[in-house]
């Protein structure tokens, strides 16, 4: 049995996690569960849960904040007590957390859960990351997770929580094209507008670029446009 040593970074420490290497590719065989796990039950997370429910998906939520969990449950959604308990019920997690540090925290819990099973090939899992993340760290994380049958799809949203709930936000997708196609029904539930901007890391770049442009009242600001086009491809720039 072969293992890969992976270095995951967070704000306070550097930890080494031994990942079991798998030769199986999940991109061509993955089918999402009818119940979707949701980590992060704030305004964005709750809006995404409503979108999933509207599309016919069950949604199971988890948040480290008891008050957020209570409000989510009072809205008629099922709640979980941990990330590990979510993994017992679904093969798809939507991460509505704040930043890449929070994503890494969730990944650490997932890997800890997987380490308790002596499997040659771990069960496939897809993470849909809706946070505003660090492009370089997410690009590297996607490569590391793929070795353990975990596919990372970046899906930051351009729009407010109200726009998300109304289906008016845009998903800026970064990741494997085949996997994004396989997850089309879930991604369509989250937003009616989607742009695949490239590989993992590009979604975060596009989100940062749109945030920059939104701070300027006039899109004809040439300096701003030139910076935008350096960050993301010209075709994507025109679409956004």
Image (spheres, rainbow, N blue to C red):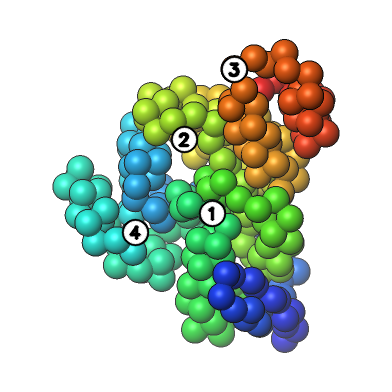
The residue under the point 52% across, 45% down is 130
Answer yes or no: is residue 165 visible.
yes
Q: Is residue 5 left or right of residue 9?
A: right
Which residue matches tag 2?
Answer: 190
Name which residue lies at 34% across and 59% down. 63
**Contact, CB < 8 Å: mark 1 with mark 2?**
no
Mark closer to the observer (4, 1):
1
What secondary structure is marked by label 3?
Answer: loop
Quadrant of the image occupied by residue 111:
bottom right
User: Which disc is residue 217 wearing?
Assistant: 3
Residue 80, how many percent across, how many down?
30, 62
The quadrant of the image that shows the N terminus is bottom right
Q: Secondary structure at mark 4?
A: strand
Give the CA separation, mark 4 to mark 3: 37 Å
Q: Circle 4 sits on which residue? A: 62
For the residue pair 38 and 97, the one nearer the viewer reads as: 97
How far apart, in angstroms, are the residues tagged by discs 3 and 2? 28 Å
Closer to the N terminus: mark 3 or mark 2? Answer: 2
Q: What kind of element bears circle 1? A: loop
Mark sitting on residue 99: 1
Pick whichever of labels 1 and 2 is earlier in the sequence. Answer: 1
Left or right: where 69 falls relative to 92: left
Of marks 3 and 1, the one in the foreground: 3
Task: Determine whether label 4 and label 1 are within 8 Å by CB.
Answer: no
Tell me which residue sits at (21%, 49%) in the image. 71
Q: Nearer the viewer, mark 3 or mark 2?
A: 3
**For marks 2 and 4 on the same chain, the one whose residue lies earlier in the sequence:** 4
Residue 28 in view: no
Query: Is label 3 in contact with label 1 (beta carbons under 8 Å)?
Result: no
């Amino acid at each position: 049995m072969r293992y890969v040593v992976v270095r995951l970074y967070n704000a306070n420490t550097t930890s080494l996690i031994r990942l079991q290497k798998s030769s199986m590719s999940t991109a061509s065989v993955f089918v999402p569960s009818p119940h979707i796990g949701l980590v992060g039950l704030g305004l964005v997370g709750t809006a995404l849960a409503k979108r999933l429910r509207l599309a016919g998906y069950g949604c199971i939520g988890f948040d480290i904040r008891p008050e957020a969990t209570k409000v989510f449950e009072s809205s008629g959604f099922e709640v979980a007590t941990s990330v590990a308990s979510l993994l017992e019920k679904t093969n798809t997690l939507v991460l509505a957390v704040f930043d890449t540090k929070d994503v890494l925290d969730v990944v650490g819990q997932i890997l800890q859960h997987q380490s308790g099973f002596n499997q040659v090939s771990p069960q496939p899992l897809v993470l849909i990351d809706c946070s505003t993340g660090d492009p370089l760290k997410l690009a590297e994380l996607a490569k590391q997770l793929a070795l353990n049958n975990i596919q990372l799809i970046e899906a930051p949203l351009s729009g407010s929580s109200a726009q998300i709930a109304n289906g008016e936000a845009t998903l800026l997708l970064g990741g494997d094209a085949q996997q994004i196609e396989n997850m089309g029904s879930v991604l369509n539930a989250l937003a009616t507008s989607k742009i695949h901007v490239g590989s993992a890391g590009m979604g975060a770049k596009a989100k940062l670029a749109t945030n920059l442009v939104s701070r300027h009242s006039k899109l004809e600001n040439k300096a701003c446009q030139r910076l935008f086009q350096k960050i993301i491809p010209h075709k994507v720039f025109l679409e956004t």
